[in-house]
Image: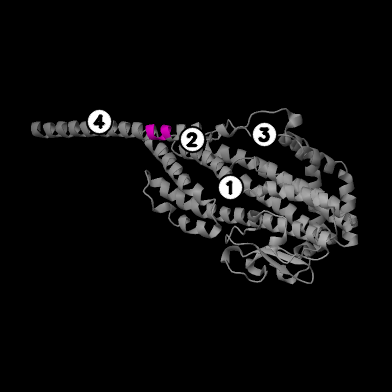
Amino acid sequence: MTRLKRLFKRLALGLAILLGVLLVVNAGYSWWIGRQLEERLAALRAAGEPTSFAELAPKPIPPEQNAAAQLAALAPELKAFAKDEGHFFDKTSLGKALRERQDRDLGPTPEQAAAMREILAKYADLPQKLQQATDCPGYASRLDYSVVGYTQLMEELMEPCNHARTPARFLQWRILVLLADGKTEEAIQAGMTILRLARLHEREPALVNGLVAIGIRGTGMNEINLALRSGPISANLHQQLETELARQDDPQWIVRMMKTERAFNLDASADMFAQGWWIPWLGKGLQLDMLDFYDRLLPVMVQTWRESIPPFAQFNRFPHRTYVSGILIDLLTPALEAALDAVYHDLAMLRCLRIVNSLTAYEQQNGQPPANLDALDLPTAATIDPFSGQPLKLKQTDQGPVVYTVFKNGADDGGTFKDQADMGFAPAGYPGAEQ
């Protein structure tokens, strides 16, 4: 018994020493990881880049100068319109038929336009109010940047997404009716308001809001394309549209957006192990791995689409500090690759529309289409396809010009949009534009 007791005492002592060593190692490693993390975060802050959700908070501005506050004040009217719009499309034969026409880039019939005009009359002041909101000199997001925890952060991020598309849909309705009434210039002005709404929404943080901004911009660009082809407009309005499109043609926007996404993911990574007080280095190690991931990702975002694809396959081949990092990067990478597709598509469509605007202005002034893109009064960068790095394609047809990107397959399919072989802007009813 005495020998057994001695053995147990020695085992207990050995375990205590081992536990003590492990605790010391754990504490030392946590300190070392924490020091690395603080140095990396400090360097980002010194460069003026956000490292947490709280640091994304904008400086407050007076409500009368804040487009976000102005748009929030319009929420009741926009909600009422959304209800009327839903009833029209879902409950009436005219609305259901209009959906089918819109799928073919066709405007409303006189009867459909009359029904839409009646609904729009209930919101006669809303176009001017939206114009005033987009004319505000500033935009300060109204999110609560003090929230903590992944669930709360996600709920807060999603809040501006819920209703952001409604103003664009209202203006889209207005454009369809204006074009039916032959008011081309007013239709283009309304389309430019949609573009400005998209640019404002880009000020909301993180990828999810960036994708919503792309969706809003897409609505505006589609309607402007139809308007430009429906009748002549003044040279001054052509220039106004080019100025707005050039302002939105910003390849660096995705980098700024992803930096806000990085700040959100740093908070989310810390929250994942917030309860793991016995292994505090896990959360810090995950944050460091996220910083490494974004250091590799951000330079890829400004390459052509074709150059950006190979690096995505390499992102998870680097060593990680935690077992969770590889899992999260595997989950993040496909989503970010899809987001990159959307961003490049958005950029390509912007440049296609700049060309359509310049083409119609050239033809109005010269009485004939240009021989090629070089004849247009556009900077070279505005004619480059971000998917290929080569000039965008121009195809003249009996209905009018088709301007397009070779898109992801890299091949010129003759302006055929079916199955997304090519993508771009075409005249209404152009058969190759069916997707």
Residue 10 vertical position relative to residue 341 in the rendered view, above or below? above
Classify residue 154 as left or right of residue 395. left
Mark 4 crowdedness (10 Å alpha carbons): few <14, some 14-19, many ≥20: few
Main SS category, magenta section: helix
Q: Is residue 255 magenta?
A: no
Say whether residue 134 is visible: yes
Spatial separation of the CA atoms under disc 3 and disc 4: 49 Å
Q: Residues within 10 Å of mark 1 (few under 14, many from 20)?
A: many
The residue identified by callout 2 is 44
Q: Amino acid at mark 4?
A: Gly
The CA span between labels 2 and 4 is 36 Å
The magenta segment: 35-39
Classify residue 431 as left or right of residue 113.
left
Question: What amino acid is labelled 3 in the image?
Answer: Arg
Q: Identify residue for label 1.
A: 254
Write down the residue under mark 3.
142
Q: Position of residue 320 (x, y in %)?
A: 38, 46
Q: Is residue 273 above or below residue 93?
A: above
Q: Amino acid at mark 1?
A: Ile
Q: Residue at x 8, y 33 (%)?
A: 3
Q: Is residue 174 visible?
A: no
Q: Is residue 417 above or below residue 21?
A: below
Q: Earlier in the sequence, mark 2 or mark 4?
A: 4
Q: CA distance from mark 1 to mark 3?
A: 22 Å
Q: Callout 1: helix, strand or loop?
A: helix
- Viewer-nearest of discs 2 and 3: 2
